[in-house]
Image: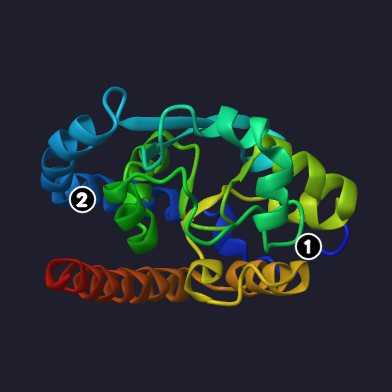
């Protein structure tokens, strides 16, 4: 396939899957207390289920179910469909991305989880299952992946040659929602990383998100 020579061979190596499986299992054990802490808070604010499930497009276009902590009200998607014009105007990211500031569908605690990235923690289960890798392009909802395929078939093709990732350079960049050009650039830069660089990236993101979480929680307490 054309235009995919930049993808580092490590993304297809058995060693990556082996290390990912070990690290994801370790993460699950370390993060288990967070599951215990978040459970009653989410149960109180949102109710069951506290885990949000959504179909995403994975490697070779295969669909899979992604797991996240629920951060929005239960009827979030129907609210978006009912008020499509309103949400379309509020969206500041180029299609097929969707991003608005202070989304009214967030619960109070859900907003904290989303801003700190803690809502993504259940995806270590997706890594263990083999749907995802620790590092790779972020998985798109099925409808957004279809839109991307229409916009840029080549981009759609090479980003789905590998497993989608929990971590990516896209996560670190504050300008990631500004343009498709920036988004594509960040994905290419992620896919040229060798195995060592991928795990350095994981450490970097974990520390940055941890710092962000501490700062956000301290601000919340001071209010």
Instruction: Tell which of 200 and 213 is nearer to you.
Output: 213
The x and y percentages for residue 26 are 20, 50
Q: Quadrant of residue 47?
A: top left
Instruction: Work out whether 159 lies above or below 130.
Output: below
Mark 2: few/some/many CA within 10 Å (<14, 14-19, 20+)? few
Instruction: Work out whether 204 lies above or below 156.
Output: below
The answer to whether residue 55 is seen in the rendering is no
The x and y percentages for residue 137 are 59, 57
Q: Secondary structure at mark 2?
A: helix
The x and y percentages for residue 138 are 56, 54
Left-right relation of 88 to 71: right
Q: Quadrant of residue 93?
A: bottom right
Residue to which mark 2 is pinned: 26
Instruction: Work out whether 214 lies above or below 100.
Output: below
Circles 2 and 1: CB atoms closer than 8 Å? no
Residue drawn at the location 55% of the way across and 73% of the way down: 193
Distance in Å between CA atoms under marks 2 and 1: 32 Å
Residue to which mark 1 is pinned: 4
Mark 1: few/some/many CA within 10 Å (<14, 14-19, 20+)? some
The answer to whether residue 110 is seen in the rendering is yes
Q: Quadrant of residue 196?
A: bottom left
Q: How many marks?
A: 2
Instruction: Tell which of 54 and 112 is nearer to you.
Output: 112
Residue drawn at the location 49% of the way across and 67% of the way down: 171
Left-right relation of 199 to 162: left
Q: Secondary structure at mark 1?
A: loop
Residue drawn at the location 67% of the way across and 35% of the way down: 142
Left-right relation of 17 to 93: left
Task: Name the quarter where the C terminus is drawn.
Answer: bottom left
Among the two numbered marks 2 and 1 on one chain, the one whose residue lies closer to the N terminus: 1
Instruction: Work out whether 147 lies above or below 216.
Output: above
The x and y percentages for residue 214 are 19, 72
């Amino acid at each position: 396939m054309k235009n995919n020579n930049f993808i580092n061979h490590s993304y297809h190596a058995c060693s990556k899957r082996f290390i990912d499986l070990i690290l994801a299992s370790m993460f699950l054990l370390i993060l288990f207390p967070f599951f215990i802490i978040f459970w009653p808070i989410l149960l109180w604010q949102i109710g069951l289920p506290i885990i949000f499930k959504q179909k995403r497009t994975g490697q070779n276009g295969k669909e899979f179910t992604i797991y996240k902590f629920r951060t929005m009200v239960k009827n979030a998607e129907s609210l978006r469909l009912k008020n499509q014009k309103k949400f379309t105007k509020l969206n500041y990211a180029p299609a097929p991305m969707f991003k608005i500031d202070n989304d009214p569908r967030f619960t109070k605690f859900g907003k904290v989880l989303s801003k700190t990235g803690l809502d993504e923690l259940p995806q270590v289960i997706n890594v263990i299952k083999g749907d995802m890798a620790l590092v790779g392009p972020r998985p798109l909802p099925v409808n957004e992946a279809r839109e991307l395929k229409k916009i840029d078939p080549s981009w759609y093709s090479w980003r789905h040659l590998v497993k989608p990732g929990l971590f990516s350079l896209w996560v670190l960049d504050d300008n990631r929602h500004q343009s498709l050009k920036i988004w594509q650039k960040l994905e290419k830069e992620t896919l040229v990383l060798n195995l060592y660089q991928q795990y350095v990236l994981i450490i970097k993101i974990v520390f940055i998100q941890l710092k962000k979480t501490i700062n956000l929680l301290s601000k919340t307490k001071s209010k």
